[in-house]
Image: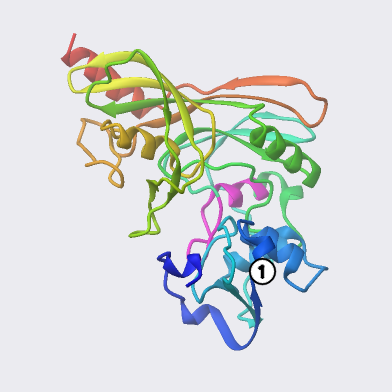
Amino acid sequence: MPAADRRRRAPLRAETHELAQSRLVIVPPFAAGDRLDGFLQRHGGESERSRSEWQRLIGLEAVLLNGYVTRPSERVATGDRVSIAVAVVSRPASVPPEDEVAFTVVFEDPAMIVVDKPAGLVVHPAPGNERGTLVNGLVARFPELQSPQGDLRPGIVHRLDKDTSGLLVIGRTVSAVADLQRQMQSRLTEKRYWVLVRGGIDEEEGVIDRPIGRDLRNRQRMAIRADGRSAQTHFWVRERFSGWTLVEALLLTGRTHQLRVHFASIGSPVAGDTTYGRGDALPGLRRQFLHAYLLRLRSPHDGQEHTFTAELAAELQSVLSRLRGSFA
């Protein structure tokens, strides 16, 4: 059985497809471990399609992996069956601009835009959630980001969870996106977070080094898995309260839900996290206590290094003020 057949995936939504005609591609041994979008760009049989176009088609659920909806970043295995719908129900070829989407532009130059994303804002559109995202707001303010291929993630280099606030960088050109991604993959960037976690942590400083992969029982979650991708988080304890600890965390890798999974794995889940923790109630806390407060990188425009910071979101500052008052 192909490895991907054992993964649980979201069921196919029939209304998004016309699957009377489809083309099947079987993953050969030499392509095992490739990302799905990269595999299709190289072996999908349609050389004119760019990687971003394959990402768009995967997002539209026109590509299925072993009969299930998946993501561009999914890794393929030998023998996996990739079906490509020939006829797809039409969808908008561009992201609808929305001026009312609220976010703060921290910096911009010809190559990149740095924004401070508020909690509650989804980064990019996805099937069933095409409006009201950061990308909708970005293409309204920066029309050049709009992708002629209908890419639903134009310029997006990395993401923050919906309920995580803080700094994000967006590439303004294809070459800028590639440069920023290379910096992140080569660990030439720095991303630091403020995190409030449940319980006490004995060490003043430490590194959590535990591989992360898709949870086999629930594909909406990630989990610590021996066969997962390498993941490391460096952290420092900055303040202690009765039952809670404020931590500064440096991402050494960038896995999905990395901070939430790592801190839950050491018995200190992120405050307010209902997926990997109990969602323990704290006065004034209505989401997970995660804030990306520092981002350091070089601009692809001129090679200049920049360090950006974003103040802790107001509702999180209030939570800390109450804890300091209660346990002073």
Q: Percent x, y for residue 153?
A: 63, 53
Residue located 45% across and 40% down the image? 211
Tell me, yes or no, if residue 94 can be seen here.
Answer: no
Looking at the image, which residue sits at the far bottom? Answer: 20
Residue topped by disc 1: 28
Residue located 57% across and 71% down the image? 80
Q: What element carries label 1?
A: loop
Q: Residue 264: which quarter of the image?
A: top left
Of residues 264 and 145, which is closer to you in this image? Answer: 264
Q: Percent x, y for residue 328?
A: 19, 8
- Is 136 included in the stretch rendered in magenta? yes
Q: Is 152 above or below relative to 172?
A: below
- Is 224 included in the stretch rendered in magenta? no
Residue located 58% across and 55% down the image? 73
Which stretch appears magenta? 124-139
Q: Is 21 above or below relative to 206?
A: below
Q: Is 218 above or below relative to 22?
A: above
Looking at the image, which residue sits at the far top? Answer: 328
